[in-house]
Image: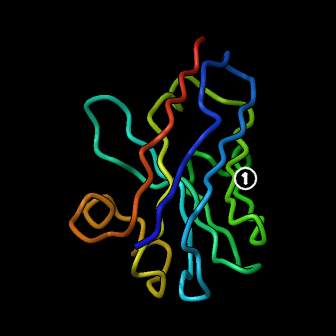
């Protein structure tokens, strides 16, 4: 089982930027993808971005395309999410996770039912991001 620890959350004004980091312990070549997810108060957890490990492709949900960027430093076992031009609706607890079903197509992996269902993967504890207008 992997251990994931997020950091970098905080408060930022709309239009600003923030960088979240996720350090993954126990990372092996069997870990095929790492993702960032978020959960706003009263809402289900949703996907934000996904990267396939060791230089693989990255994917984004429509609401963050062109604003958020996921990156990998494999040697440091660190996965970062650069958040630019943030909006108040980006306010949420942000989590990184190692999904178990990385072989699924992105749109199938990132459904809310799958993300919030049992056995999705290993999760971190989360880091809060608050965007003020």
Q: Residue at x 67, y 15 (%)?
A: 13
As drawn, is 73 to the left or to the right of 80?
right
Using a 10 Å C-alpha cutoff, classify the residue at mark 1 as few (fewer than 14 neighbours), some (14 to 19) or many (20 or more).
many
**Where 78 falls versus 6 (above or below)?**
below
Q: Which one is in front, 114 or 9?
A: 9
Res 50 → quadrant: bottom right
Image quarter hosting the N terminus: bottom left
Q: Which one is in front, 67 or 124?
A: 124
Q: Position of residue 91 (x, y in %)?
A: 50, 28
Res 57 → quadrant: bottom right
Secondary element type, mark 1: strand
Q: Position of residue 24 (x, y in %)?
A: 58, 63
As drawn, is 70 to the left or to the right of 45?
right
Res 58 → quadrant: bottom right
Q: Residue at x 54, y 73 (%)?
A: 26
**Where 30 falls versus 45 (above or below)?**
below
Q: Residue at x 32, y 28 (%)?
A: 41
Q: Position of residue 127 (x, y in %)?
A: 51, 36
As drawn, is 69 to the left or to the right of 89?
right
**Where 122 falls versus 10 (above or below)?**
below
Q: Which one is in front, 30 or 46?
A: 30
Q: Report the residue marked by disc 1.
A: 69
Residue occupying the far left of the picture = 118
């Amino acid at each position: 089982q992997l251990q994931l620890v997020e950091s970098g959350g905080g408060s930022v004004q709309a239009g600003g930027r923030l960088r979240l980091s996720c350090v993954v312990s126990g990372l092996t070549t069997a870990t095929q993808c790492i993702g960032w997810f978020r959960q706003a108060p009263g809402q289900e957890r949703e996907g934000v971005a996904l990267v396939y490990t060791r230089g693989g492709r990255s994917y984004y949900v429509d609401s963050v395309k062109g604003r958020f960027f996921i990156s990998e430093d494999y040697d440091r076992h660190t996965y970062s999410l650069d958040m630019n031009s943030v909006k108040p609706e980006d306010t949420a607890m942000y989590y990184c996770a190692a999904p178990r079903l990385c072989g699924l197509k992105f749109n199938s992996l990132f459904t809310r039912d799958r993300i919030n269902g049992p056995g999705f993967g290993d999760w971190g504890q989360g880091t809060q991001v608050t965007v003020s207008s």
